[in-house]
Structure formats: C-alpha cells, structure tokens
Amino acid sequence: MRNDAIIIGGSFAGLSAAMQLARANRSVCVIDTGTPRNRFASASHGFFGLDGVAPYEMLATARAKVAAYPSVRFVDGAAVDAAADEDGFALTLADGQRLMARRIVLAFGLKDTLPAIPGVQDRWGKTVLHCPYCHGFEFLGQPLGVLSVLPHSTHQAALIPDWGPTTFFLNGGPMPDAETQARLAARQVTLEPAPIAALEGQAPKLDGVRLADGRLVPIAALYLTPRTSFQSDIANQLGCAMEDGPFGPVIKTDAAKQTSVPGVYAAGDISRPMHNATLASADGVMAGAGVHQSLVFPPAAAA
Ligand SMILES: Cc1cc2nc3c(=O)[nH]c(=O)nc-3n(C[C@H](O)[C@H](O)[C@H](O)COP(=O)(O)OP(=O)(O)OC[C@H]3O[C@@H](n4cnc5c(N)ncnc54)[C@H](O)[C@@H]3O)c2cc1C
C-alpha cells in the first residue's frame, strides 16, 4: 500500500506534521529511531504550556495523541535509503522493509559534535548547554562560562551576562577583533585566553574550568554552540538543496516547508538556522498542512 505521506523522525517536528495529516484522515507512516536531540536534558523549557517537562515525557504524550487517529501507523526503526519512483517515493528501512508514499517529510533532526574537552560529554544538557533561553534561568546569578567554538560564540558570550557574570573561554584560540572585544567589555565579559585542560566537579555538577596552566575558573554552567550535522543522509540522497547555517548545513525550504525536490518536505532543526522545540513543532504543522494541500491541489495550484 502506498501511504499519502511518510515522515522520517517522530519527534517535535515529525509528530506535529503527522497530527495535521492525521486530522485530515490521510494515511501517514511515522518512522522513528527514538533519539531526539534534547534527550540529554532532564527537562525541556519554554514550550507553550509544557515548560519544565522531561523531553521523553512530552514526546510520549504527543505520540499517544497522534496514534489515537486511525490513519496513522508508527514504525520503530531507521530509514536508510529513499528514492523517487513513478508515483512518489520508495523508502528502505535498516531491517530491509520497503515503504512507499506520495510525499515525504524529513524531520530526522541534528546531531551535535561536542568539543573533545574532558568532562564536556558527561555534562551535556545538564551543566554544559547550547542555549540560555532553554537552560539559563536555572543558573540565574551564578558565574557562567561560554566556550569559543564557532564565530557565533562571540554572540553567545555577549548574551549570557543577562543570566550571570560571564567568562569567555578562548581555549587557546585567537583573540576576537578589537570591535568584538569592545562589545564584550561593554557587557562586562571576562576574556580567558588559556587552553582548557578539563571541566571539574562531580558530573553532571560543574565546579569550574581547569586551565592548562593549572588555574581553576569557578563556573556553574558552560554554554557552547556545537557544530551540527544531519542524523540521516536521506536529504542528500534525494538531492535536496542545502545552505550554510551558523552551526552546519540547513535544508532549504519554501514557506510551506517544501524542499527543492517536489514532494519532499523538511521540518524542524534540519530546516532552520535557529533550533528550538517550539519552532520545530511549528515547522511540522506547516509541513503537514503543506503536504495535505499538495495532495488536494495540483502542484501548480498548491497553496
Ligand atoms: C541538550 C539540548 C537541550 C535542549 N533543550 C531544549 C529546551 O529546553 N527547549 C527547547 O525548546 N529546545 C531545546 N533543545 C532544542 C531541541 O532539542 C530541538 O530544537 C528539537 O529537538 C528539534 O526537533 P526535531 O523534531 O527537529 O528533531 P529531533 O527532536 O532531534 O528529532 C529527530 C527524530 O528523528 C529520528 N531519526 C533520526 N534519523 C532517523 C532515521 N534515519 N530514521 C528514522 N528516524 C530517525 C530521531 O530518533 C528523532 O526522534 C535542546 C537541544 C539540546 C541539544
């Protein structure tokens, strides 16, 4: 049987897309490997009405709501291969299962490449964090750090003083230019040029940053913007156009979240430069409605 849509990824973006299609009574299959990007955090913050709820709890509730609709099917497994066929798309899963659909929604999320500093991985999502809007209020007024990883790190260093007194760790990297130094000085950010040896404390608690010269800089949380990459290669297989984002590649989409490949939609972190569960969910709503309308209207007239 050919589904109206297959959704690759059953998290904030994918389940939101599935909900729109389910409520239009369209046949939809959601494939998911169960590794949402924020699984390292014990609580998710800022989501409308669900501030502070654990990520897996949010997703289990959302999945149950979607599963209550009769036209939806879930497959727990990995999509590994996708290609266009005469009526849409054919997909292969890791276990060899083949699925077909008229449309595909890519919602497979990102993975983070963390800097190879001892103690970073153990604390990811707890006291080593990517975003102060998601995990800043919990450390309000305490000494905080920002690690220089990407050009975007100076932007983060200028933001964080709203949550606590901030040290910007260059970790042996180049000094920012004079204009950036002046901007950081105006925000009372302390620059620390020395290379970092390790993070210290009983993980996930963070006591401070041990520098290679032996000094300890006490901080309660360290913010960093990791490089990102796609959790799946399927957008490349399908030939979707990409653009460079501040952290890694982004799949180009139009206002209805359709990619450069007709019939292939993308939603969530993979399709936007700013990453947040609410925005991923909103993308999913748009993609679900976009898919539905493309099934109703001939492509040239699709809204
Ligand atoms: C540590 C951390 C904490 C965060 N905290 C917050 C927060 O408090 N509040 C907030 O708003 N945002 C937070 N975020 C951001 C948030 O996690 C993302 O914006 C959000 O998860 C993006 O949703 P998504 O649906 O696009 O992708 P994801 O949530 O990453 O989901 C992608 C899904 O696709 C599945 N998948 C991947 N490959 C395949 C495949 N080949 N086949 C089938 N399934 C596949 C995965 O298993 C996963 O379920 C945090 C991020 C991090 C890294």
Image (spheres, rainbow, N blue to C red):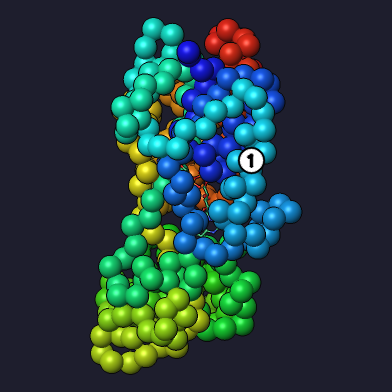
Q: Residue at x 38, y 51 (%)?
A: 111
Q: Residue at x 40, y 37 (%)?
A: 77
Relative to 142, is 298 above or below? above
For disc 1, the marked residue is 64
- Asked which secondary structure carries label 1, the reply is helix
List x then y, in percent, for residue 273: 48, 46
State the quadrant of the C terminus. top right
Relative to 241, is 185 above or below? below
Relative to 231, is 93 above or below? above
Nearest to the observer: residue 101 or residue 252: 101
Q: Residue furthest bottom?
A: 215
Quarter location, residue 95? top left
Q: Residue at x 65, y 24 (%)?
A: 70
Let me know if residue 251 appears in the view: yes
Nearest to the observer: residue 188 or residue 196: 196
Mark 1 C-beta to ligand 1 under 8 Å: no
Let me know if residue 223 appears in the view: no
Q: Residue at x 74, y 54 (%)?
A: 49
Tell me the kind of residue under disc 1.
Ala
Dot 1 crowding, Cα within 10 Å, few <14, some 14–19, many 20+? few
Nearest to the observer: residue 124 or residue 69: 69
List x then y, in percent, for residue 280: 56, 43
4 relative position to 210: left or right: right
Total residue callouts: 1
250 relative position to 3: left or right: left
223 relative position to 84: left or right: right
Quarter location, residue 226? bottom left
List x then y, in percent, for residue 281: 60, 42
List x then y, in percent, for residue 58: 62, 51
Relative to 52, is 295 above or below? above
